[in-house]
Image (cartoon, helix red, strand yellow):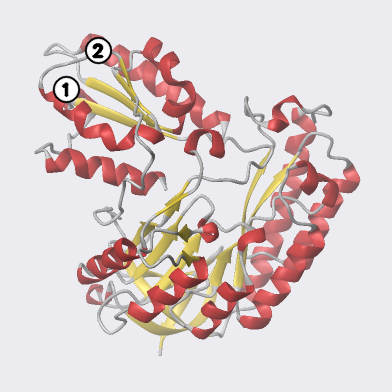
Amino acid sequence: MNLAESAALALAARERGWEDAKNAEEADLVLLNTCSVRATAEQRVMGRLAHYAALKKKRPHGAFTLVVAGCMAERLGEKLKEKSADFIIGTSARSRFPLILERAEQGGSSRALIETDEKPVFSFSAFHYDSGENPFRCFIPIMHGCNNFCSYCIVPYVRGREISRSPDSILEEIRLVGERGVREITLLGQNVNSYLWEGNSTGGCVDFPGLLELIAKNLDTTGGVRWVRFLSSHPKDLSDKAIRVMAENPCFCRHIHLPVQHGSNRILDAMNRRYSREQYLDLVGRLRSALPGLSLSTDILVGFPGETEDDFDAALSLMDEVKFLHAYMYHFNPREGTAAYTLDGRISESVKRERLSRVIALQMRHTAELLSSRIGAEVTVLIEGISRKNADELISRTERDEMVVVSARAGAIGSFANLTLSSLRGNTFRGTLK
């Protein structure tokens, strides 16, 4: 999401005639688009702010304009003025970025907090998202914000309530990126499958399954987008109707990121996840029944306040039962303002790190087992670019989100190919063209 939003902000600058600078030393404006999900992310931004503040003082030809945008700007607001930021623009006021550019063009620098009294609207698109080395894949934001208020998560406080984008604008963007050569899109949202558009003039509405149906119906797979992914999904919102639509339409890749966070019902309840271990496992069973060959990835959070060894074992046993292909694993990081921040029973840093190391070791074993079992499988891949390790090889990806190296001509980049997974090194396959 940050990549897509950063691209939208960069596009706003380019449309006014701004160009990318080679480095900060030559820039007239530096923009930090921030994240507040983890305290470590904010700490890195504070370090960069100190660096740019010092750089501004050293500039012989005048200081550049320093802008802080995104979730951290929304959360801290006025406090960032003390860090030499000229403009602070939170998520709710992102559409006013052109006003900052105008001020910068005029040499203005007033340490301003940019706010808006307007009703929030969906104010960005990923159409001009520059995917760098993978110009055949792009992100399509469809909603932002979150109404869930998981007890450990800062997102609803800095992103606001859920706002969905119109189906027409989504479909038009998919058509446009397809014309530009994009072959795979990822639908984005903080809680992507709670998408709900109620702006239909006839009084109807479009929910997430309905949007998936519209996308599948309107794809031009002969020369445009062929594969569709989405993230991040909340287990409570992934409906049977959505599963059915995916099963009926091969354009939806057979991989889903489905964050479980934990395997203990007691901890899941304390996290306010609004599903049980049993409900999650039932959902996994329904997904795998409807979508044979489906791979799953997840998020695992350990060290939540009050987590006992029995609770932790429940997380490990759920991982053993599901066997995720990949996982994002982290330990509890208290975020001021969330419900979990004041909970008793904080786990020591040493115990959190030890438990996290055990989770990582288990996931590495599952990943190795699952990938090894795939050797010999026949797959379709999207060839994305030249391998960084060997210029004579190309890197590609399966719909199950597996990386495959293949020997092929550079002209094949951006096309689909049928391969046999012939060997495995680390987590990357070597494929043989059929």
Q: Is residue 231 visible?
A: yes
Is residue 392 toward the left or the right of residue 351 in the image? left
Q: Position of residue 160 (x, y in %)?
A: 49, 38
User: Mark 2: which amino acid?
Assistant: Ser
User: Where is 183 relative to 195, above or below?
Assistant: below
Q: Secondary structure at mark 2?
A: loop
Residue lying farthest to the right in this orientation: 310
- Residue named by callout 1: 103
Nearest the camera: 258 or 235? 235
| Residue 10 falls left or right of residue 68 | left
| Residue 339 screen position, x and y as percent | 70, 31
Considering only order in the chain, which callout, 2 or 1, is on the residue closer to the N terminus?
A: 1
- The reply to whether callout 1 and callout 2 are in contact (CB within 8 Å) is yes
Q: Residue at x 63, y 24 (%)?
A: 336
Q: Is residue 258 above or below residue 226?
A: above
Which of the labelled discs sits on residue 110, or is there none?
2
Are there few (<14), some (14-19), or many (20+) residues within 10 Å of tag 2? Answer: few
Q: Residue furthest front?
A: 202
Residue at image x 48%, y 38%?
159
At a point 76% along the width and 38% down the height, the residue shown is 303
**Along the line of sight, which residue is nearer the eye, 279 or 362?**
279
Horizontal relation, residue 408 to residue 207: left or right = left
Give residue 368's mark: none
Indicate the position of residue 16 as horizontal and vertical percent values: 11, 38
Residue 98, image x and y in percent? Answer: 20, 33
